């Protein structure tokens, strides 16, 4: 059985192949492909067949660049390494203190239980 992701992937693959084949036919044989709709100016069709994808790619790249810039501008700077290491050291000291106090309490309880026997 095919999963939902595989179905979507197959659909994307088919759409891309169909668009690639149509684009290739329009660029190299515009009269054959578009001639069924009436007279076609080959040069004009080829120019637009190049201009439109280049424009879309350019806008997409500028959009990605703008998104990266916005993300960098609105993200707070990270903590300095010194601050991070000092926090880690403090946590380790706290853990050691808790461990020592737990061990001391256990030792004390063992001493009390031995004296009662």
Image (cartoon, rainbow, N blue to C red):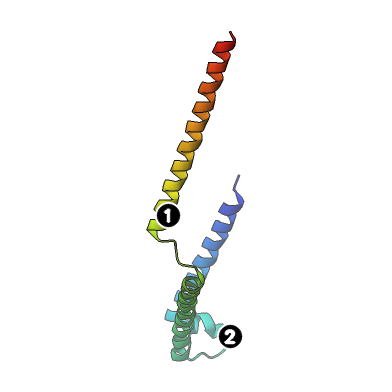
Q: Residues within 10 Å of mark 2 (few under 14, many from 20)?
A: few
Rendered view: 5 above or below 12:
above
Of residues 91 and 106, the one drawn nearer to the viewer in this rendering: 106
Residue at (53% x, 85% y) in the render: 35
Residue identifier under label 1:
84
Indicate which disc, 2 or 1, sits on the residue closer to the N terminus. 2
* Residue 63 image label: none
Q: x, y (%) of residue 100?
A: 47, 32
Rendered view: 96 above or below 70:
above
Q: Residues within 10 Å of mark 1 (few under 14, many from 20)?
A: few
Task: Point out the residue furthest to the top here.
Answer: 117
Of residues 53 and 40, the one drawn nearer to the viewer in this rendering: 53
Residue identifier under label 2:
37
Rendered view: 61 above or below 35:
above
Q: x, y (%) of residue 89?
A: 41, 47
Q: x, y (%) of residue 98?
A: 51, 36
The part of the image, by quadrant, that contains residue 114 is: top right
């Amino acid at each position: 059985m095919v999963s939902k992701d595989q179905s979507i992937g197959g659909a994307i693959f088919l759409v891309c192949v169909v668009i690639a084949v149509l684009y290739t036919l329009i660029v190299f044989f515009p009269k054959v492909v578009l001639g069924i709709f009436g007279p076609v100016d080959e040069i004009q069709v080829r120019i637009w067949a190049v201009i439109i994808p280049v424009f879309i790619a350019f806008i997409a790249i500028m959009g990605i660049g703008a998104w990266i810039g916005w993300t960098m501008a609105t993200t707070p700077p990270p903590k300095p390494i010194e601050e991070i290491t000092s926090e880690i050291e403090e946590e380790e000291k706290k853990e050691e203190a808790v461990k020592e106090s737990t061990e001391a309490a256990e030792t004390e309880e063992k001493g009390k239980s031995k004296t009662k026997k």
